[in-house]
Image (cartoon, helix red, strand yellow):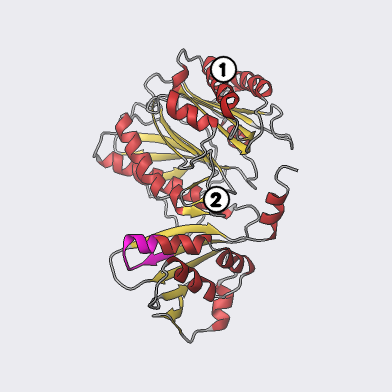
Amino acid sequence: MNATFYDSRWIEPPEHVRVSANGGLPRGFRAAGVACGVKPSGGLDLGLLVSDSAATTSAARFTRSGTLSAPVLLTMERSDLFALRAIVVNSGNANAATGAPGLEDAARMQSEAAREAGLGDDTAVAVASTGVIGLPLPIDSVSAGIAAAGKRLRASGDTEFAEAIRTTDAFAKRVCQDVMLGAGTVRLCAQAKGAGMISPGFATLLVFVQTDARLSPQTCDLLLGVTVKRSFERISVDGQLSPSDTVILQCSGASGVRVEPESADELRLGEALDATLRQLALMVARDGEGARRVCRVVVRGGDGEAVEAVARAVANSSLVKTALYGGDPNWGRISQAVGMALPGAAPVAVDIAIEGIQVCRRGAALPHDARALADAVQRHEVEYEIGLPGEGAETELFFSDLGHEYVTINAEYTT
């Protein structure tokens, strides 16, 4: 467990949060990860996560894709999203674009996971899959994996679970931490995967969050909704939208610490969840399939639509991203992306600064220290600030660069 989980200058952890060096799930949770042969490369590829508390509440968010995977469809339509007790997930195969057989396989995963979790109700189980699209799920292998995972469930199983959900991720993304509330201390843990097919409209993303705090379903849903908008909807690797995105928050209540709506503890837990998800989102962007650097673009001025359009245009521009990869201080790439987002007859009076060095004011180049700028864009984290005419609106996005390894990984993804 990395006790320095919060390693970015852009994410400030609250003072009442302590990262645990030893890990371990919140009270009431058990998890496991096993290898069942879905990944062609081998390794752990089936995860099972269970809350043993009958009082568990939950909330979920899913992709906006128009081609939803079978697990997403099944979970949205058949699961009780406010009372999820278990999650079963495989990597190596997305079970997407698989038609009726894919739905049948997802339903089988759901029922078999319910049995291994000791649940009499299939609707208390969420199903997720990630990997190659359009291939039949090897359901017999997955079924054997679910049975094996059921026998390995334990409170320290989050490490294996986080490993089992990875696909092209260069590293596992997980954290366990203690959150000091007025009513007592609770644990907050999370596991995430994602490195490619990442867009500000969500990502090839699986994120599972657990706490032993006791929350109402409404509070759980509110906190997840607000924090997802500030984290996983604020990242881009390649501007592509996945059919599999799933984010789930589960609250076992096993600590006995109740978080009341509109209370100081709700705010403190919300701050902890917000920092956690923003750091995980940044890790996803940083992991962007061969990425060297990650960038934060901040856009101010204009109106809400304009700043959002500009941020997305910059974050998804291949020219901007390749310049970032090469450490090239070519701010003209940023300028062209702004123009593409705001087409019109009149020139846009845009301001541009890179790492605090202003290079453009009201659409015109400014004299600046070229050596200082060249050095600044060599950093692992680079920040762009863009100012548009007007006041009142502001947004941010985190995005990765785009380089040779991204092409190699995706050119050979199924071969």
Residue denoted by label 2? 240
Give the image location of residue 72, x and y in percent.
50, 32
**Residue 391, above or below 118:** below
Could one spot residue 378 in this view of the protein?
yes
Residue at image x 38%, y 63%? 307
Q: Range of the magenta residues?
A: 298-308
Residue at image x 49%, y 64%? 314
Classify mark 2: helix, strand or loop.
Answer: loop
Q: Quadrant of the C terminus?
A: top right
Residue lying farthest to the bottom in this orientation: 367
Could one spot residue 296 in this view of the protein?
no
Q: Quadrant of the N terminus?
A: top right
Residue 304 lies in magenta, yes or no? yes
In depth, the one of 275 and 254 nearer the eye is: 275
Give the image location of residue 87, x and y in percent.
51, 27
Going by the numbered disc 1, the residue's amino acid type is: Glu
